[in-house]
Image (cartoon, rainbow, N blue to C red):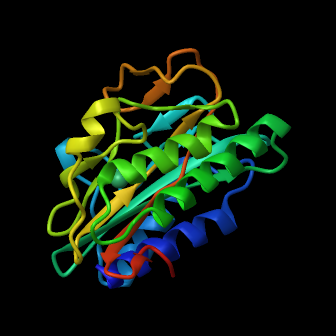
């Protein structure tokens, strides 16, 4: 998983370096896929429930699961890239939000708050903690800035499969938190706050994949695959 995560981290860094106005999301997808295969990995999303590309690219009001294609990046876009890699049967999954050129102050603030929400979630990881400890940390970090957290999609366990138990919600679910699973040492989780400027509600576009905010306001997304160790978290999706 560490090797899968390294490749994911490399791809995200590469795409953040090259993304610029005028480039298409299809070009980003091709660059990502080439790098994954050159490093001996497989693109985990390609063919997953029929997804038709190597990575997901989602722009502005698009939350997650956008399909790369001929759309050109524009100055001021908030581009979310989500990358999954399989290496020798093991998965890693991570995402970043990339500001394209100069973005609005609101956009920059949203990106910073979402990254901090992920960091807060990661810091809550340790053997013996509950999944709800992660949810609570993520939720508080984003809501204190007045933003909302997407509820219809969650983080997840990850390993031999892309999506494993448990779900890792980005909001704490009240009294249910008491029954939230305890994290054993050796588990791995994908923690992935999806944070919206407006409503937390989402809908899926007619392509059957692209998730957008219902009010079409901005959304940001950061994700890491994290190993649960006795002493605390180990982030696997870094170059
Ligand atoms: Mg994920």
User: Is residue 31 or residue 166 the one in the foreground?
Assistant: 166
Locate residue 112 relative to residue 138 in the image: left or right: right
Using the image, determine if residue 39 lies above or below residue 72: below
Residue 57 at x, y percent in the picture:
50, 46
Extreme residue in the top direction: 215
Query: Which residue occupies 66% across, 54% down?
Result: 98
Q: Is residue 235 visible?
A: no
Residue 147 at x, y percent in the picture:
63, 31
Q: Is residue 134 visible?
A: yes
Residue 91 at x, y percent in the picture:
25, 69
Query: Which residue occupies 50% across, 71% down?
Result: 11
Query: Which residue occupies 59% across, 64% down?
Result: 15
Using the image, determine if residue 82 lies above or below residue 34: above
User: Is residue 141 or residue 42 the one in the foreground?
Assistant: 141
Q: Quadrant of the N terminus?
A: bottom left
Residue 168 at x, y percent in the picture:
32, 48
């Amino acid at each position: 998983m560490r090797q899968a995560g390294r490749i994911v981290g490399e791809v995200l860094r590469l795409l953040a370096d090259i993304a610029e106005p005028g480039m298409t999301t299809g070009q980003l997808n091709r660059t990502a896929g080439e790098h994954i295969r050159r490093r001996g990995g497989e693109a985990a999303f390609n063919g997953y429930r029929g997804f038709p590309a190597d990575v997901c690219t989602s722009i502005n009001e698009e939350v997650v699961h956008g399909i790369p294609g001929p759309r050109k990046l524009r100055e001021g876009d908030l581009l979310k890239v989500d990358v999954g890699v399989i290496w020798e049967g093991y998965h890693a999954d991570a995402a970043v939000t990339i500001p394209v050129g100069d973005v609005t102050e609101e956009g920059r603030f949203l990106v910073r708050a979402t990254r901090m929400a992920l960091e807060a979630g990661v810091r809550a990881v340790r053997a013996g903690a509950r999944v709800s400890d992660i949810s609570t940390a993520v939720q508080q970090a984003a809501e204190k800035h007045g933003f909302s957290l997407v509820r219809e999609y969650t983080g997840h366990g990850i390993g031999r499969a892309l999506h494993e138990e448990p779900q890792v919600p980005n909001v704490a679910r009240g009294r249910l938190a008491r029954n939230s699973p305890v994290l054993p040492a050796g588990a791995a989780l994908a923690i992935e706050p999806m944070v919206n400027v407006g409503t937390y509600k989402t809908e899926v576009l007619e392509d059957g994949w692209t998730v957008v905010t219902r009010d079409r306001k901005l959304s940001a997304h950061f994700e890491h695959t994290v190993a649960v160790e006795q002493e605390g978290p180990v982030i696997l999706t870094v170059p």
